């Protein structure tokens, strides 16, 4: 499906969008078992992204309401010998899904990525979120043989 172009716009997020972005992330984190929602941490992370030169938050807006968002951060890839984009936080309000809004957000993020010098984008998705995985495959993403590992703190 396509985005209803006259009514949905993609733009850079603003500080005035913070409440809407926090609400979208509450929805996203409710389905991700690896993360728990902490409103203050989420708000702080969003503020840091808004201020970062090599990061972006894009929002989908319809009728003056933020209905979706995605974030991206430039990292340096030794495999690429240059920048790559780490995509996070792709979420659209449940009642607006299936209308092309998520694809429009990812397309806009891909354009931003190229402007930032990154020609590879990568993301993490919950392995049990079949709907999200199908969406990403439909948008041309593919799985790799890599797995994600994480560790908290800086100690051994």
Image (spheres, helix red, strand yellow):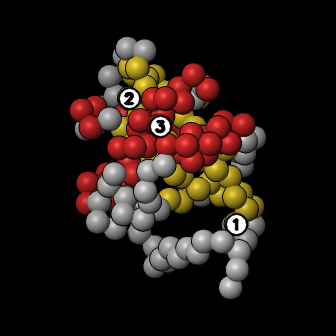
Disc 2 on helix, strand or loop? strand
Determine which of the numbered discs, if any, sits on residue 67 in the image.
2
**Quarter of the rendering containing residue 141:** bottom left
Specify whether 122 is left or right of 20: right
Q: Residues within 10 Å of mark 3 (few under 14, many from 20)?
A: some
Q: Position of residue 75 (x, y in %)?
A: 69, 58
Question: What's the mark number on residue 22?
Answer: 3
User: On the picture, is 131 further left or further right than 49?
Assistant: left
- Where is residue 106 drawn, in percent x and y? 47, 43
Image quadrant holding the C terminus, namely bottom right
Q: Nearer the viewer, mark 1 or mark 2?
A: 2
Label 3, label 1: how many angstroms apart (C-alpha)? 29 Å
- Which circle, 3 or 1, is nearer the viewer? 3
Q: Nearer the viewer, residue 34 or 121?
A: 34
Which of pointers 3 and 1 lies earlier in the amino acid sequence? 3
Q: Residues within 10 Å of mark 1 (few under 14, many from 20)?
A: few
Disc 1 target residue:
77
| Cα gap from disc 2 to disc 3, whole angstroms | 12 Å
Pointer 1 or 2: first along the chain: 2
The answer to whether residue 67 of the structure is visible from this angle is yes
């Amino acid at each position: 499906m396509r985005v209803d172009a006259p009514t949905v716009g993609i733009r850079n997020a603003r500080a005035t969008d913070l409440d809407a972005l926090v609400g979208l992330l509450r929805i996203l984190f409710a389905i991700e078992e690896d993360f728990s929602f902490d409103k203050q941490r989420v708000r702080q992370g969003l503020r840091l992204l808004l201020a970062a030169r090599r990061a972006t938050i894009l929002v989908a807006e319809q009728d003056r309401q933020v209905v979706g968002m995605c974030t991206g951060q430039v990292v340096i890839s030794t495999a690429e010998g240059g920048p790559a984009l780490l995509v996070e936080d792709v979420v659209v309000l449940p009642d607006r899904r299936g209308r092309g809004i998520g694809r429009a957000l990812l397309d806009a993020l891909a354009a931003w990525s190229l402007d930032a010098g990154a020609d590879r984008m990568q993301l993490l998705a919950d392995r049990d979120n079949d709907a999200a995985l199908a969406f990403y495959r439909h948008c041309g993403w593919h799985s790799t043989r890599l797995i994600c590992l994480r560790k908290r703190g800086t100690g051994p």
